[in-house]
Image (cartoon, rainbow, N blue to C red):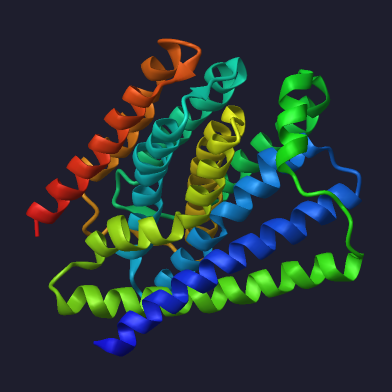
Amino acid sequence: MYLPVAQVIAGLVFLFLGGEALIMGASRLALRMGFSTLIVGLTVVAFGTSAPELFVSLGAVMDGLDDVAVGNVVGSNICNIALILGLAAMIRPIRINARLIKLDLPLLIAASLWLVIILLDDSVWRWEGALSILGLLAYVAFNVWEANREDEPVKEELQMASPKPGWSLTKDLAFIGLGLVALALGANWFVTGSVTVATLVGLSPAVIGLTIVAVGTSLPELAVTILASRRGQGDIAVGNVIGSNLFNIGAIMGITSAVHPVQRGEILWADMGIMLGLTLVLVPMLLLGPRLTRSRGAILVACYVGYLAWRVLLI
């Protein structure tokens, strides 16, 4: 029992440190290459915080644990909205930028619906994964085109949050390389240890993916979102959650299923409905006022606690 627990702890540490190293190295490299801080914030940071999910899902599929891979995506999206965004709002009310409501949130709703649709036959095939990846690439390309049209307040917030190019190119590449290695090792240890521990206490692979793995791989999103909230950078806090959820569906589910078709397994339609429902709940919450208040954040956190309690009762 001690070895699996040690694997879980070591895996979490490596996932967190690997994600941080990848974000730092890739952000500095992108800035060095002349990309704007806006592009870096909306793409590199969002993908970097979702990198643990990618490595964990790929590792799970390679081990034949499709439930863990699908549950990781669905559970992470639930966790990002209900727990992470909720906690961030409870720490400090978050100012909402109009772009998030008009563009990014509707795209996330569409992406969530797409995930439900492609799982209707209980499988995600390679061509469906390829379409998911193309959709994400289109989103990134649009952000590149849109970058220079953003207003100054958004650029200033991202300027404050993005790392400045100060190291040599060699150090940037070293951070990227070390980050990728740490993510690969951390994902392997975390999945192996989590599955072993959860199996010993009677949890199914689906529940493991939806809860333990989802929360563990969402630690980078938690760190970035709460830090941005404490600094009063609301657009970055909300944007990181929405962007990470888009990357989870487009990149993680897309790349994983493109490598190997993925089965839904024991992931319930109720889990899918809760993921989609929480995404839709953000619409009235973000439209009710210019800020996501502490009370609304508390409602989101309560939803997540209720979801976990319901999932445990099903065991």
- Tell me the residue at 48%/17% (across/down): 291
Q: Image quadrant for the C terminus?
A: bottom left
x and y percent of residue 287 in the render? 44, 12
Which one is nearer the viewer's eye here, 92 or 50? 92
Determine whether 261 is above or below 146 in the image: below
- Tell me the residue at 47%/56% (across/down): 219
Which one is nearer the viewer's eye here, 89 or 61? 89
x and y percent of residue 118 in the render? 39, 43
**Residue 280 vs residue 150: left or right?**
left
Q: In which quadrant of the rendered view does residue 69 lie?
A: bottom left
Which one is nearer the viewer's eye here, 39 or 58? 39
x and y percent of residue 314 in the render? 9, 54
Determine whether 103 is above or below 250 in the image: above
Residue 127 visible to an observer of this rendering: no
- Tell me the residue at 40%/61% (across/down): 216
**Residue 1 vs residue 113: left or right?**
left
x and y percent of residue 126 in the render? 50, 57
* Number of numbered callouts drawn: 0
**Residue 306 vs residue 130: left or right?**
left
**Residue 177 vs residue 204: left or right?**
right
Determine whether 253 is above or below 117 in the image: below
Q: Image quadrant for the N terminus?
A: bottom left
